[in-house]
Image (spheres, rainbow, N blue to C red):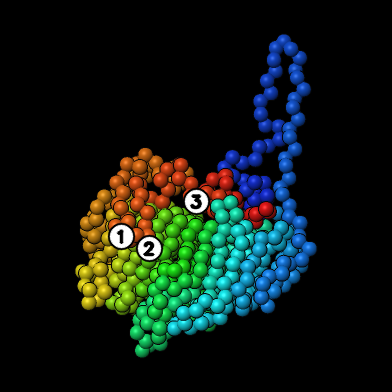
Amino acid sequence: MAAFARIRLVMLSSVACSILAACGADGVASPGEGVIVIPTPTPTPTPTPTPTPTPPATVTPAANCPTIAGPDQLANLGTITGPGGEWRNCGFPTRFTATTAIPKVAGVIYSLPGRVDVGTDQGAASTNNVVTLTIDPGVTIFGATGVSFLTVNRGNRIDAVGTPTQPIIFTGRGNVVGSAGDQTSQLWGGVVLLGRAPVTDCEAPAATPGTVACERDTEGTSGAKYGGAQPADNSGRMSYVQIRYSGFILSADKELQGLTPSGVGSGTQLDHIQIHNSSDDGIEVFGGRVNMKHLVITGAEDDSLDTDVGYQGNIQYVIGVQREGGTIGDSMMEIDSNGNEDTSPRQRVAISNFTYIHRNNAAGNGVSILVRGGADYTFANGLIVAPGFRCVGFNSATTTQAANPALDEAGPPVFQSVSMQCNASPFRGTSGVTDAQVQAIFEGGTNNRSNYVPSLTSLFINGATETGFTPFNAKTLNAFFDTTAYVGAVRDANDTWYQGWTCNSTTANFGTSSKSCSAIPTT
């Protein structure tokens, strides 16, 4: 979970690129391109003039900030100007104390002045819901400073539901003013969701894990408690959401991720979420019972997906891509319970239909997927492309121990229909686990292969080879899963669940209906 904070020089050329239709794969034609055909013997016709490029849409600032429900009003902070135009900058209050909605208004952009809280902590034993913050489709919210972040406290909810064509965007100030590019990160904190579901890493030494007495502060924050004894707790919904350039380090070993669900219950809905260029993990889950679907994690500087401290849940459809260049990013997945190896409730997760593009061959964990601390995991219908790296590693003998109900132990990790392209040593065992043990567990599943040669198109779309693989029916694991006739995150070119609501970069391009990550939507 170590953070790799970086401050990079952002080239002005990337800004110009975002203005000119995001400089997609087709580029921008130079004036005068084309072939002039001269018929014979007729006179040479007058060449057709080169059309004048259509200027990019510009934003005109609204006259004022909208009035919202409740006593906590928006602050008119003047205007902010970027390549897309000029917006009215409407600052959030430091705390929402009443239910309200943030509307999409032409010429308005919203900002977080620092830490912004939704409601106040209701405590682990509470059952109420006090404040709901609704964010309308198409709204853009930026962190005004590096230490800006949004916290949804226990007993309160967020309702951030965008659409495939109008995603909700959380980003940093540099993105708005045009200084963010494909290597930018760490512009602001991120989004923290706090719930009352069970966790195992108790702040109080005498507390029993999984009870109301077991709670703690979220990593990177203070006064942001999570944990309780309500598995079905509801912290709201986030859908069709982008979280860009997050992960600010608050202090040593205290950093925020793009999205941090902490003690969040199964009543919470998280789907169609992209985390782009987080300086720490893309998503880190601390305990709880939340399920997640349709995740896109691009350019994370630590782990793409990290799960910890008694998390039990299900995850389906994940595209994870490390940054182009192969020098940034650690594991695609880090699964932790170190120090709580035999603590109940034990971490138990099933993940299906994932495609991981691992580009950093010097990542600190040494493997693309690291399972440690006795966690129980099932991996199904997965593709790992890591040709210069090891693919799977287990740490600690507790990770490979046999099933034991007395210890809440389901047995070693399970792999079903997982194909991997790895280096000459695909498996790694440490701290009481041998490489051979990891290999035996992997090969003990069905339809697994560590000699996979990808035929993926557009980086992550299944080709002929992947189409020929036999899938595993993940619905046999939990009713949450869809039954799919394919492995990987994207069935074929006709499968477009990732398009429109995501953003493009040199890391991954999601098609013409998705816009540039370095640009703010103007409509």
Check disc 3 and report its element: helix, strand or loop: loop
Please tell me whether residue 45 is drawn above or below residue 316 in the rendered image: above
Q: Is residue 90 left or right of residue 386?
A: right
The answer to whether mark 2 and mark 1 are in CB contact below 8 A is yes
**Quadrant of residue 433 within the rendered picture:** bottom left
Ranked by sequence position, the earlier of labels 2 and 1 is 2
Q: Position of residue 243 (x, y in %)?
A: 55, 62
The one nearer the camera, 132 or 87, is 132
Spot occupied by residue 253 in the image (x, y as percentages of width and height): 48, 76
Residue at screen point 39% across, 79% down:
229
- Quarter occupied by residue 405: bottom left
Name which residue lies at 52% across and 81% down: 121
Contact flag, marks 1 and 3 (Cβ < 8 Å):
no
Could you tell me which residue is drawn at 61 percent across and 76 percent down? 98
In the image, residue 12 sits, relative to residue 70, either above or below, namely: above
Q: Earlier in the sequence, mark 1 or mark 3?
A: 1
Residue 433 in the figure: left or right of residue 206: left
Q: Residue furthest top?
A: 41
Q: Which mark is residue 92?
A: none
Quadrant of the drawing holding the N terminus? bottom left
User: At label 2, which amino acid type do we have?
Assistant: Asn
* Residue identifier under label 2: 314
- Labels 3 and 2: the sequence-earlier one: 2
Q: What is the C-alpha distance between the residues marked 2 and 1?
A: 9 Å
The answer to whether the residue labelled 3 contacts the one labelled 2, judged by CB atoms less than 8 Å apart, is no
Mark number for residue 498? 3
Q: Which mark is residue 477?
A: 1
Q: Is residue 254 visible?
A: no
Few, some or many residues within 10 Å of mark 3 (<14, 14–19, 20+): many
Q: Is residue 155 visible?
A: yes
| Residue type beneath disc 3 | Tyr
